[in-house]
Amino acid sequence: MSDGPRRPTVRGDAAAVGLFYAALFLGVGINVPYLPVFLAGRGLAPDEIALVLAAPLVARALVLPVLGTIADRIGSLTRAILLYAAITFALVWSIWFADGFLALLVTTAAVSVFWTAQTPLADAVAMRLARTSGASYGRMRACGSVAFVLTASAAGLVIGAAGSEAIFWMFALGISAALVAAVVLALRRMEAPPPLTRPSWSGALSAIRPALPVVAACALVQSSHAMFYGFGSIGWERQGFSNGSIGVLWAVGVVAEIVLFLVPARHLGRLPAPALALFGALAAVVRWSWQSTEPGYAVTFALQALHGLTFGATYLAMVRHVAETAEAGRQGGAQALAATMVVLCMAAATVVTGPLYAAFGQHAFLAMAAPAAVGLAIIVTGAVRRAR
């Protein structure tokens, strides 16, 4: 009888988190595929566009751990999300008025810091809800992936009709939706117990230490996607794939990710986080090694389906392992530190993708198997040590 009133509350909490993921990823579906198009429309040269895209990575690596610790100090991750969503909403309009390379670099970096800080906090909220009430983290997170696919697809049509300046207004609309969803989320009662000691950056580092090997392995596998994000479409175009075919390949990857997230928690939960990371790392080694051979459309289609493992499984493994090992009152800082490690690895991998692709073309994808292999070795080594 006592579980009766709680069940609707859990469903409402899960719906609020799923709504927030969906709203947050509306902006991601605009920013990731189309920000370079907006910057080019504003007159930036290719090298300037590359710097504007790289600046948020640097800023996030420096600031994310601080924002995660501040969220823990606030004592309410949902209110911290609302605060960062409000700051993002206030800052996003500066991009519209930015004129020239330096102004666009500064404004996009500032927006990115507070905008992306919301994701690890949402992961911490969703994971705690999943662990305490049995709600499905995957279903909540899948709402974001579905929103990404739908937005990225629709945005292309809008840009074709209205031009590159429409990218900003669609992005601002996504930021606005995230603010509204953050208000809804903050009104729910989903607070974690207070930490035993006052949250700090060193405390967050201590909280993430037990999960560090798995986090490092997952960050390396995540960074192995750098060549794909930067040169996947370019390489496919050079292989003669049509624009429509390339769009299908991108969609297949995200759909595979969604499928993984929608697997019932009772099934995925049987696999420990290191095992999920192992499958993701192994799939990444296979994916990038084979991709480097220009295997043709049919095989490339199948390799794209591995995105559910190379991205989805490693992301889920990292978030879950941090949630399982970090103290409840330090979840925000710990998840932010894990996200920072991914950013650092991704930035390092991104730096080398340009020269490698210029020198070796599609064969450069083989280099991306290297960080995935290192991540795989870390996971296997940890398993061997635990077995002794």
Image (spheres, rainbow, N blue to C red):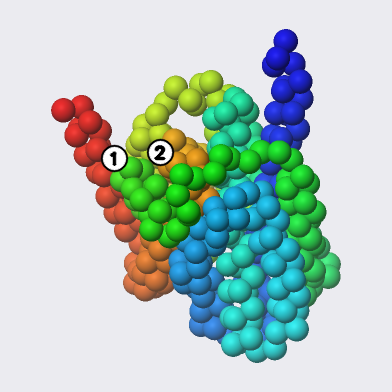
Element carrying mark 1: helix
User: Can see residue 148?
Assistant: no
Q: From the image, tell me which residue sits under label 1.
A: 379
Of labels 2 and 1, the one closer to you = 2
Q: From the image, tell me which residue sits under label 2.
A: 325
Residue 280 lies, in percent from the top left, at 40, 40
Name which residue type carries label 1: Ile
Which residue occupies 70% across, 28% down?
10
Which residue occupies 73% across, 51% down?
182
Which residue occupies 76% across, 57% down?
179
Front in this rendered view, residue 20 or 102: 20
**The N terminus: image quadrant:** top right
**Which quadrant would residue 107 be assigned to in this image?**
bottom right
Badge 2 crowding class, 10 Å Cα cut-off, few under 14, some 14 to 19, many 20 or more, is: some
Q: Mark 2 or mark 1, which has the lower sequence index? A: 2
Q: Is residue 51 above or below residue 212?
A: below
Name which residue type carries label 2: Thr
Q: Is residue 89 above or below residue 179?
A: below
Residue 104 lies, in percent from the top left, at 64, 82
